[in-house]
Image (cartoon, coloured by chain):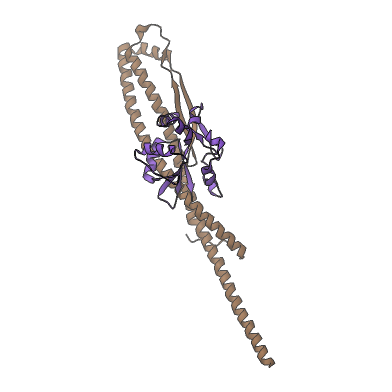
Chain colours: A purple, B brown
Amino acid sequence: MPSKTSPDKIIEGYLFDDVRVMNAQIPRERKSLEELLHEERPHVLCMDGSPHHFRKRELDNLSRMMTDEERHDLLLPILMEVASDRVEVIIRTRSGADAKVISAVLNMPVTVQDNKITIFRPQLQVIRKTLKTTTQYVFFT
Amino acid sequence: MAAKVELTRPTKIELARLKRRHKLAARIQKIVKDRLSILIMEFLQTVKECATVKERQLSEFREAYKALSLASGYHGSVPLEKELLMSEMAIQLSSGMRNVAGVRMPLFEIDTADPVRSAVKDRTETSSLLDHSTELARKCLETIIELAELENSLELLGREINKVKRVNNALEYIVIPSLDVTIKYLTMKFEERDREEVSRLKYVKLLIEKKEAYAF
């Protein structure tokens, strides 16, 4: 399982100083789609200790658009970085799986630059409408 | 509203501490503002969804009542009531929580919904009309559950928006201006002290020069 063998560097990067308090909703550890599909009640624990459950229907939809390898690579929830000094929202990705999901939801190709997918705020609404439980906000300064 | 100067010890350490606090408050305010805009976006999206689901619910209820009245007309009210009393449906609903920008919202999901089981043995007492109306009633129940989740989320989001707005206003209109004023007051005080020190030194220098001049 990738989330256990390799520490999630993306989450580690978000958590420092006062930003830690404002980002209590981000997961302590992300889980792969494959792992979540095998869980009875798929969930992750947030920084404040509360559980964040995933909608099974959403996971099934994601599973349908992924290959076996991508299911293993896709870590959920997908973290979307919101920063006040930026108009765009950044999604950090380790594999191409995140890009494939975002591209399918937005119904347009997305580019990955330096392991980052850049989307704009109006597109955020479209993503959130489809991926309500499988995406999470991260506030960044 | 004019910001008040927080009375503090006029020391350089205090000034450094205040500057640090100001920087932190400004940084937190940025995040709070971001969070507020995200929460408002989520709220508006939930309102839209709520309206759509409510509309759907109304049309489903209309259909269900129409089917029920047809079944009632066909069977008569007493056998229909008997059938309704003796039928049951098992529904497995799992509830959870989802966290949206720090707001914990309910999540309901229907795992399995068994078909309606009737205890009426006599098949002549049931009909396809009744089956159709029970099917529509089941759909209504699913929509009610969906709507319950959305309306609860809406309420929670609204409450959180109010809370975050208050925090943002407190930071914007009270905390940051008061820190600004206090920092300005302390900076001016130190500048004044520096100026006094310079003039004192000049005076001392003058005295020493005079003393040296008289000595010769």
The quarter holding residue B197 reads: bottom right
Residue furthest out toward the bottom = B216
**Residue B128 vertical placement versus A65 (above, below):** above
Residue at (58%, 63%) from the top-left corner? B15
Please provide percent x and percent y for residue A79: 47, 41
Q: Residue furthest right?
A: B215
In depth, the one of A65 and B56 nearer the eye is A65
Query: Which of the pair B114/A32 is nearer the observer?
Result: A32
Compared with residue B95, is residue B168 higher up or lower down, i.e. above or below?
below
- Left or right: where does residue B150 sit relative to residue B179? left
Side (left or right) of A26 relative to B212: left
* Total numbered circles: 0
Residue A21 seen from this side: no
Q: Is residue B46 left or right of residue B31?
A: left
Percent position (x, y) of residue B150?
42, 34
Residue at 33% from the left image edge and 21% from the top image edge: B65
Which is nearer the eye, A69 or A25? A69
- Decide if residue B43 is in sight here: yes
**Residue that sits furthest to the front in the current view:** A69
Residue A77: x %, y % from top left: 48, 37
Up-down: is B36 above or below B133?
A: below
Residue B124 picture location, percent across and down: 34, 7
Question: Which image quarter is the C terminus of chain B in?
Answer: bottom right
